[in-house]
Image: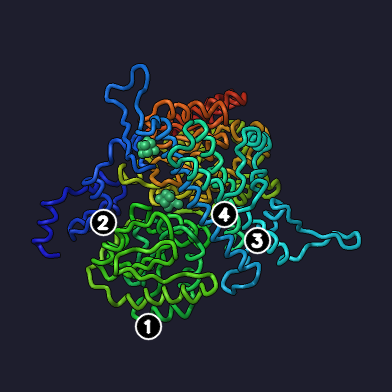
Amino acid sequence: MAEEQKEKVAKTQKMADPVAASIDVATQQMIKRAQDLAIDTVFDRAVTMRPCNIGIQGTCCKNCAMGPCRLPLPKAGIEGEDTRKGLCGATANTVAARNFARMVAAGSAAHSDHGRSVAEVFMSVARKETEDYKIKDPGKLLAIAPNFDVATTVEVDGEVLDRDLDEIALEVAEKALNEWGKAEGELYYLKRAPEPLYERWKKLGVLPRNIDREVVDIMHRTHMGVDQDYKNIVKQCTRAALADGWGGSMLATDLQDAMFGAPSPLQSEANLGIMKEDHVNIIIHGHEPILSEMIVAAAQSQEMIDYAKSKGARGIQLGGICCTGNEILQRHGVPPAGTFLQQELAIITGACDAMVVDVQCVFQNLANVAKCFHTKLVTTHPMAKMEQDNVVHIEFDEHHAMEDARRIVKMAIDNFENREQELMIPKQKAVQIAGFGVESIEYHLGGTFRGSYYTLNDNIINGRVRGVAGVVGCNNARTRHNEAHITIIKELIKNDVLVLSTGCNGIACAMHGLLTPETAAVYCGPGLAEVCETVGIPPVLHLGSCVDNSRILLAATEVVKAGGLGRDLRDLPAAGSAPEWMSEKAISIGQYFVASGVYTIFGHHLPVEGAPVFRDYLFDGLEKIYGGMWDLEPDPIKHAQKMIAHIDKKRRELGIDKARERVLMDMADRQRLESV
Ligand code: CUV
Ligand code: SF4
């Protein structure tokens, strides 16, 4: 980089302080390197561009051309009547609720459209139109079939026989794909929820009819001059969000498991240090495992490995970013190279020979960064292209998936010898155990003989495990990378709360060493430590990608079924959290957690502060309806403490708070604590 250009950049642009931007040393080093090379990253842009003060409050409306109408909260607050209104008269509540609803719609659409792609490939498999994908896990197919009212056995002359697997697959495929657009009825999976919860949804009229319709409904309803009652808008948010959590996302997870295998615990690593100087490095980024599964298969083929060696590399190193990274982590042990905020940094190592992306969470600036290096940036999805001319588009299609994948891998290998910049791969990487799921939690915590959640429930009732938290979601460049994720989780496990993690939170936990069984002795309270050590699990269980939040719903449902902790999800000593959220998908996830009865707290901010009445409805009003509620707390320790307070409240309501006091006064525990 020419000195003068560096100076120019330094003069014209404020830059991020690497240490203030992330708690991760590898990330800090790479931010610094980018700055030295005069390449801006999201961390620098977060310094130069501040958020809009009105948008952040949720009260800017641009739903028609008479606007944008801006309704900021007056500095002094509102005394007496709130007279703020847009040209049409829309109140701050209406504007904020409409904006919130459109986030739910986008989030639900993103997860569910991913699910649709999976269902379409599943249909190709069932119809035997593709050789490249198969049903690797027939057990999972048989397990989900009854949820679609698809029989797994047939009676022939009074004898019950197993039904042909191909027939079952075809029927499941048809019924599953129909969930996106069926003309009448309701989604099949809703009945997987505990009965009282299903009945409540039914009584309230929020059972999703089909997945696409609930998203379209929101887009219509929030058009200028339609729904102008924030409570009614929130009701539709619930319907569309349930269509995501108990619909599109759950279908995605199940059909992926059936085709690619349900995950089981395995060892891997995480962080930029997984990239290798002497290997062809291919980074896979995005969300749909349709693509990444094939890239993994192609990169592991002897032919490609030999080809890489013929070009002077010692092998091929795959790495993941974001949720598609989690998909291939949990099924193949492919290590994540980093979280959402590290995507540019993987290229800045100079060692990324190709970055392959599909949909969601992909920075357009990757193209600008790739231009400064030899890196090939490959877009693969018909829905997701980039305007920059250095981006290669290789459209991926399930009918010739392997062929496409090999073309991409070969392109990366051919690019290995084009490395021009000096390499700088940070050394940091941590070991992790990932790949948990509803089935493996049952196996590990239930014991092989019982095969149920009984033991977990027992440990919750006796207080060794105080409760369960789902901590999930993105990073956000407006907050210090990974700080809230890690601080909150350490506080939770210190207080004996077992954590289920997904998304970039899972990657963050892996990077900071929280996903090993050994972590338990270091960070956990005595009760949780004992349980983890006895069964050999980490105190934080990585359940996969964002669509795999459906695994959290189903794991919680299994806990209810195992007995002793109430009849409904709202009765459980459990809480949900997204400490560093940024995506619209997170809002949809939050809403379906709340509507499923879970106390759900977000970090950083929520765009609702400009409409206090609407905010209070989300924060308190919904609890009376669903038992779950939204909350917000930017301070990580207070955030965790609020979750723990909710868990304790539920323990009291269940009458199991006394048991926990006894555990805390146990002499053996005390001695254990002192000896640590
Ligand atoms: Ni789907 S949605 S930043 S990759 S978790 Fe990561 Fe997860 Fe948020 Fe995106
Ligand atoms: Fe303004 Fe109403 Fe139009 Fe929104 S819909 S931009 S509040 S006039």
- Residues at circles 2 and 1 in contact by the CB criterion of under 8 Å: no
Q: Position of residue 238 (x, y in %)?
A: 54, 38
| Residue labelled with disc 4 | 253
Residue 634: quadrant of the picture: top left
Tag 4 secondary structure: helix
The amino acid pointed to by label 1 is Ser
Residue found at x 45% / y 47% = 585
Q: Which of marks 1 and 4 is nearer the N terminus?
A: 4
| Residue labelled with disc 3 | 173
Q: How far apart are marks 2 and 1 (CA)?
A: 31 Å
**Label 3 crowd (10 A; few <14 / some 14-19 / many >=20):** many
**Label 4 crowd (10 A; few <14 / some 14-19 / many >=20):** many
Q: Position of residue 597 (x, y in %)?
A: 57, 34
| Residue labelled with disc 2 | 30
| Nearer mark to the viewer, of 4 and 2 | 4
Q: Distance between the residues labelled 1 and 4?
A: 38 Å
| Nearer mark to the viewer, of 3 and 1 | 3
The amino acid pointed to by label 2 is Met
Does residue 426 lie above or below 305 as drawn? above
Q: Earlier in the sequence, mark 3 or mark 2?
A: 2
- For residue 380, say whether it is visible: yes
Q: Distance between the residues labelled 3 and 1?
A: 43 Å
Q: Which colour scheme is used?
A: rainbow
Nearer to us in this view, 361 or 507? 361
| Nearer mark to the viewer, of 3 and 2 | 3
The amino acid pointed to by label 4 is Thr
Find ligand 2 in the image and state its quadrant.
Answer: top left
